[in-house]
């Protein structure tokens, strides 16, 4: 993955992010849009690869139930570790497993507008650019922890019930929208 240190080095501003603030979609210049989308796409592609690699390792080391345990204990920490002073990376979903990943009302609208041809968007929230990129159920393996009763792994399903008593993240089919990556640029 290419790094964009010349652009990210410009991002030294630190303004706190208010999760409850309403997002005001404002016109963003085409040049800025291209820059933020390019960087956001690179960051989310890397985050997805890192997360999937670690989940695959957990599956290899102990099966799907072990992967659920890994996600419970480490997925958020892993995602947080990919953030920097310049940007914060997280995931959102309408059908979240981890309550911290629940989409806000405004983000639910963003998720509902994703299509096969429109899988990302950039908005401005209180002076910060926020990039969203769709996460889709990409392979049958994902269905072992996120699928229907026919595709869920039995041990994983038990672990999900134990670790996530309010889980909403099942019932998917391959290709379904699982949620989105969210990158908040701090500059």
Image (spheres, rainbow, N blue to C red):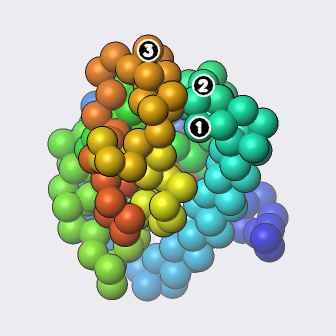
Depth check: give the residue in front, 146 or 117: 146
The residue pinned by badge 3 equals 162
Q: Which mark is residue 128?
A: none
Q: Is residue 159 left or right of residue 115?
A: right
- Does residue 46 appear anywhere in the picture? yes
Q: Quadrant of residue 149?
A: top left
Mark 3 element type: helix
| First along the sequence among labels 1 and 2 | 1
Q: Which mark is residue 69?
A: 2
Mark 2 element type: helix
Give coordinates of residue 86: x percent, y percent: 66, 49
Looking at the rendered structure, the number of numbered marks drawn on it comes to: 3
Depth check: give the residue in front, 184 or 166: 166
The residue pinned by badge 1 equals 64
Residue placed at 32% from the left, 48% from the top?
150
Give coordinates of residue 60: x percent, y percent: 75, 43
Q: Are marks 1 and 3 in contact (CB under 8 Å)?
A: no
Q: Quadrant of residue 110?
A: bottom left
| First along the sequence among labels 1 and 3 | 1
Label 3 – label 2 distance at C-alpha: 10 Å
Residue placed at 32% from the left, 60% from the top?
173
Q: Quadrant of residue 100?
A: top left
Foreground label between 1 and 2? 1
Q: Are marks 1 and 2 in contact (CB under 8 Å)?
A: no
- Does residue 145 appear anywhere in the picture? no
Residue placed at 72% from the left, 67% from the top?
7
Mark 1 element type: helix
Label 1 – label 3 distance at C-alpha: 14 Å
| First along the sequence among labels 3 and 2 | 2
């Amino acid at each position: 993955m290419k790094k964009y240190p010349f652009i990210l080095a410009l991002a030294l501003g630190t303004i706190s992010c208010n999760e409850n603030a309403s997002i005001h979609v404002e016109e963003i210049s085409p040049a800025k849009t291209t820059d933020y989308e390019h960087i956001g796409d690179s960051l989310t592609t890397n985050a997805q690869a890192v997360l999937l690699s670690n989940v695959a390792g957990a599956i290899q080391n102990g099966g799907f139930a072990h992967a659920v345990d890994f996600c419970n204990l480490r997925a958020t920490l892993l995602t947080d570790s990919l953030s920097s002073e310049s940007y914060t990376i997280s995931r959102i979903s309408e059908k979240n497993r981890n309550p911290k990943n629940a989409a806000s009302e405004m983000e639910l609208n963003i998720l509902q507008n994703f299509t096969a041809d429109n899988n990302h968007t950039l908005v401005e929230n209180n002076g910060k650019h926020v990039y969203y990129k769709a996460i889709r159920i990409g392979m049958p393996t994902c269905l072992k922890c996120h699928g229907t009763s026919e595709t869920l792994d039995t041990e994983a399903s038990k672990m999900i019930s134990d670790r996530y008593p309010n889980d909403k993240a099942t019932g998917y089919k391959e290709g379904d929208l699982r949620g989105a990556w969210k990158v908040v640029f701090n500059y």
